Image (spheres, rainbow, N blue to C red):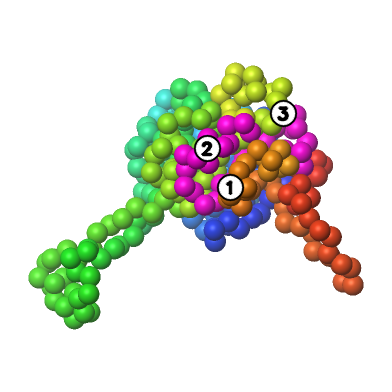
Amino acid sequence: MPTWMNRRTVAGQSLVGYSLAGEETVVALPELNVCFDVGRAPREIIPIDNLCISHGHMDHAAGVAYYFSQRGFIGAGAGRLIIHKDQAPNIEKLLAIWADIEGHPAPAYIEPVIPDQDVKIRRDLLIRPFAVDHHACALGFSLIESRHKLKPEHHGKTGPQLVALKKQGIEIEDWIEVPLVAYCGDTAIDDFLDLPHVRDAEILLIECTFFDRDHLHRARQGRHIHVSDMREVLERVSSPNIVITHVTRRTDFRSAVRIMHDALAPSDRDRVSFLMQRPPRRPKPNQSPTPTSPATTTPDESSA
């Protein structure tokens, strides 16, 4: 059965994804040509050239071989998989086994990384891995844009004056880093929240798996975030757009949204949304709109 991919626009960025704990997690940013985790490799992510795998659990990494195989059918080239260096040999073995099964290898480029090892996506965009608290090889990833900024000492100069300085070989601009998106994968709360490229990201994709009080021990045991941790998360980060992933089916989705709403300070509620939320249905012609609450703008269980 094909993956039902939700589509949202957050802070001007298109998010295409699906994330339910233990089933499948895949989050794509098509305009940036990057996908976080592969899930079962839904067709929407096959053309995306850069695939970041946070860790090796099946619900996040099952579609790796299929991703590379399907790219050949659409003439998209090898694609690049960015993964922790200690997991890269396992991926290479997996692809070799599938090459034996299929009778031919699928072109693939594996980029082994460690935390803080930048990978350039284009001249002005890079991916920076960071360590998270799930297991030894688990990573999060930040998408960081480099932008030119005029040096303070040249503020107020005219265009011709700046051109003259450049002709003299004088650097008039600095490169600054602008964190666009941070994806945390599966994790408990940890010091990565204090990294500037995570803390200040325009969009922070972070899991919150458990919501019931009785599930706190499950969160701690599995190194996941519980809704009771979210106030601390919001106190530690300045991101204006926090998107929740990896919600468990042990809690009805509408209930999870309501519990999250009640757990947050009123001033923080507008910062938080869910990847799997869908916009309110538009009323039919001649039908008055129905008042909505945070729980009625979410998919029902069958669609999640």
The magenta segment is 227-256
Read off the residue under disc 2. Answer: 233
- Residue beneath the point at 21% across and 79% down: 158
Q: Amino acid at mark 1?
A: Asp
The stretch drawn in magenta includes residue 239: yes
Residue 110 seen in the figure: no
Residue sitting nearer the eye, 94 or 258: 258
Query: Looking at the image, which residue is at 53% across and 35% down?
Result: 232
What is the distance, in whole Å, between disc 1 and disc 3 at their CAs? Answer: 21 Å
Q: Amino acid at mark 2?
A: Val
Image disc number at residue 156: none
Q: CA distance from mark 1 to mark 2?
A: 11 Å
Give the residue drawn at x 67%, y 36%.
247
The residue where tag 3 is placed is: 212
Quadrant for the N terminus in the image:
top right
User: CA separation, marks 2 and 3?
Assistant: 18 Å
